[in-house]
Amino acid sequence: MRKILEVIEDELRGAWAACGYEEKFGKVVLSNRPDLCEYQCNGAMAAAKAYHKKPIDLANAVVEQLKDSAIFSGCEAVMPGFINLILDNTFVADYIRRMRQEDALGLDKVKQPQTIIVDYGGANAAKPLHVGHLRSAIIGESIKRMGKALGHKMIGDVHLGDWGLQMGLIIEELRDRKPKLPYFDASYSGEYPAEAPFTIGELEDIYPSASKKAKFTLEDGLAAGMSGTEAEEKAEYARAFAARARMATKKLQEEYPPFMAIWKHIMAVSKADLEKNYQNLNVSFELWKGESDAQKYIPGLIQELKDKGLAYESQGALVVDIREPEDTKELPPCIVQKSDGAALYATSDLGTVIEREKDLKPDSYIYIADKRQDLHYTQFFRVAKKAGFIRQGIPMSFLGFGTMNGKDGKPFKTRDGGVMRLEQLIAEINEAAYVRIMENRTMSEEEARSTAKLVGLAALKYGDLSNQAAKDYIFDIDRFVSFTGNTGPYILYTIVRINSILAKYREQGGKMENYDFLPAVSDGEKALMLELSRYNEVMESGFAEKAPHKICQYIYDLAEDFNHFYQDVIILTEEDKQQQGSWIRLIHLAKDVLNTCIDVLGFEAPERM
């Protein structure tokens, strides 16, 4: 279905052409002065320079051409040359009718669907998700859903951190704790156990313990009140432990069977826990690939970079220059191999893109991570393109997000200053939603708890996604769970309110399919219709700009328009059945648009609140 803005623009372009001027001056925008008009054409200012005429004279000529248009009820030229447009109520009602009749509420699928990889999540094996993983997960999920709604084949990849020193640390800590396991018996030749020798709880304790052990220094011991001898002995043990971990990592990367068996246990236990926690966020992935999957491509890509003359040695490391003539600032070369021969994140990402090109051949890539990683992605993208690891012309874009801060303006922490686990954050916002729901005491505790999970998730996701991704924002649970204002619960409350009206209408024997959309009879009703008519435009531009906050702003405006309309009329006691049926159809459409949009954002509405 054509966007309403396109229909209006066609009318304006035709009028400009009829006056003997270029159609391009008929561009139309949503009015920023809704008290004066609904849409606006500002082309007369640019046309005046091209045709050496006064803008107001050009605007008046175009307005004269539009005087008999069925699209507008008001069309006025105002100084210095603006054309103010007010849509005809019958035209708007007809557009809404077609929107209701169309599949997907008038949102057209793209003519040429693309395969698009969205790289988001960025979780690490053997570590619990924490608040730092929140934004990547929910921003990535919403962008993936937006693209899917438009007909693209969207492939979300969690891209796990599952390779490297942390694995060696875990292996050696497990050896210290359980030395009799068969993985550490050099003479063992049987099958390794199918069950992991640890639970997720144990695993999540093993890594931080191992990391702390490996980093212990003489200064740490002295600061803890140890004697010089005790501190030195413990520091020496830490150095030995760290060396063991590095050796274990090397043996794992050489696919030493006992350590590969432990690694498979780590991955199985970690993935099950990560899937559960991502599911609590209503986030899912089509691919559970990790850094380990890229390792087999790294030797070849390093050699190829050398053979093409792109990689050279610098201070013992292997680097690739990424500077371009048009760069306005210095960009350091990309390190692809350390002096000890180890690969880095950039190398792993290059291996991953080679694998994706080989197996999936996507039409574009979207990477979502903290904006402080901008340099990394600039380097990685440029090396991939210079080396020809990616097909020519394939877009690679990086969406960098800002920091989630506490009320003190600093990165969000627990009350004791630690990094908060994601499941704890979800539990806290669910509890806050439960308390807010129980203030009304209209449902049982069991129902309130179930409802609070939906409300809490909406509060969490909307509170994040309503901000422009690149900006930092303040995480405020009290504000986020409010049922009023620009919040997720307010959107849900609006949907619940519409459902309640529709249910009561059906109880009275009403059937909305018996009635048609009538032209608006009030400003509030027309405002709601106009907002609904923008749905397909907002969805398309939201995805094109990778901007979930645009969807949030749209549904907030739509909810506001519905609630203003609801205050103006009394739907259920309206005696004119045609008018009542038209209003019922209108709010039903509003509910469907709201539900479709919150599904794209990754949450859903409860039956009641």
Image: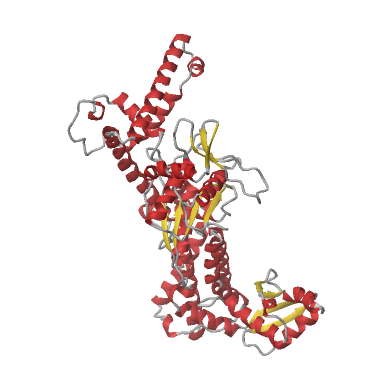
Task: State the image quarter where residue 194 is shown.
Answer: top left
Assign the C terminus to one quadrant of the image: bottom left
Residue 571 location, x and y as percent? 51, 77
Instruction: Pick the residue in front: 596 or 382.
Output: 382
Is 259 positioned to the left or the right of 554 in the image?
left
Left-right relation of 460 to 201: right
With respect to residue 218, does 109 lie above or below?
Answer: below
Quick check: 49 above or below 608? below
Across and down, in percent, residue 512 comes to: 43, 80
Would residue 189 be seen by someone viewing this image from the given angle?
yes
Residue 359: image x %, image y %? Answer: 37, 55
Towards the viewer: 182 or 477: 182
Residue 444 visible: no
Number of labelled discs?
0
In the visual, does 48 lie left or right of 244?
Answer: right
The one nearer the camera, 534 or 555, is 534
Applied colour scheme: secondary structure
Q: Quadrant of residue 117?
A: bottom left
Above/below status of 491 relative to 475: below
Residue 301 placed where, x, y %?
A: 44, 44
The extreme bottom residue here reads: 68
